Amino acid sequence: MGTSDISLTAGMRTNLLSLQNTTSLLNRTQQRLSSGKQVNSALDNPTNYFASQAATQRATDFASRKDGMSEAVQTVSATNAGITAITGLIQAAKGVAQSALSTSDTNVQSKLAAQYDTIRTQIDQMSSDASYKGLNLLSSSNTLTVNFNENASSSLNVIGFLGNSSGLSLTSASGNWQATSSITTDAAKMDSAITALRTNSQTLAANLNIITTRQGFTDNMINTLQTAADNLTLADMNQEGANMLMLQTRQQLGTTSLSMSAQAAQSVLKLF
């Protein structure tokens, strides 16, 4: 049955239209109260909706980079731990060299030379073990790339270096340490190796500082973008609650008004 098949009075049609509008506003207000947003789709406000979506998506992209930065921090930390341990081994080797210099017993010197070579082997093993998830920056062939923004146009390359005995120019005990000159030559190499490790450690520290600074920046950017998105879409819950009370009152009044409009038509029944 079409609406044209039923004749309503002008007053009833006016009240009915008002009730329909009130119901529509009630539904909208209920949705805002349940979702906490005044813009739930592009139909509500296209400009704010799409601007909010863009901010939210960028915040999500930044958040995805945080994991990469956290992993980079662990990789650099593992490398630094390796440098610290290798430095300690070299210092121990220097102690062995000092012991060799303090004696003229060739048998003792020979044993100390063997001990030094054992330490060199440990340095090689330590360098090999200082990896994180398969990436070892104590190898000159490896580079850690850390991406900071959503399209990877902002990044940092942390370049590895050869941190084993070969890369640090620590050769086997010269002449089995049977001569003072051989011992002092190897001791000088140890000093150079420690200097090289300290230099690379400083570079790693600078890179680590950059990464951690970018982590803090990323957290702030995510918070800024999410706040911006919320400002464009969130509803004022106090206002929407007041709107709900007013609309419920208006709906009750509209129903009462519609009933009163219908009384004129109902009075015709009294003629029969």
Image (cartoon, rainbow, N blue to C red):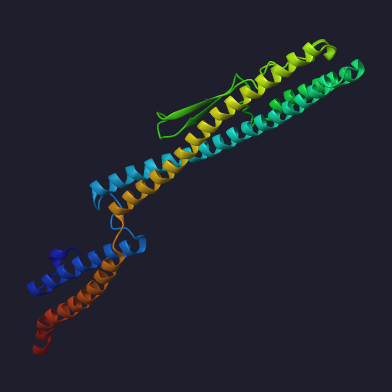
Q: Is residue 145 above or below residue 236?
A: above
Q: Is residue 244 above or below residue 140?
A: below
Residue 43 horizontal side relative to residue 4, left or right: right
Tell me what residue is drawn at x 67 percent, y 18 percent.
168
Spot occupied by residue 186 in the image (x, y as percentages of width and height): 74, 16
Residue 52 horizontal side relative to residue 12, left or right: right
The answer to whether residue 168 is visible is: yes
- Foreground: 85 or 224? 85
Quarter of the figure with the N terminus:
bottom left
Tell me what residue is drawn at x 92 percent, y 17 percent.
107
Tell me what residue is drawn at x 21 percent, y 68 percent.
22
- Foreground: 30 or 145? 145
Q: Is residue 22 above or below residue 130?
A: below
Spot occupied by residue 56 in the image (x, y as percentages of width and height): 36, 45
Spot occupied by residue 13 in the image (x, y as percentages of width and height): 12, 70
Mark count: 0
* Residue 197 quadrant: top right
* Residue 92 quadrant: top right
Spot occupied by residue 156 in the image (x, y as percentages of width and height): 47, 28
Residue 180 horizontal side relative to residue 88, left or right: right
The answer to whether residue 138 is visible is: no
Quarter of the figure with the C terminus:
bottom left
- Foreground: 3 or 115? 115
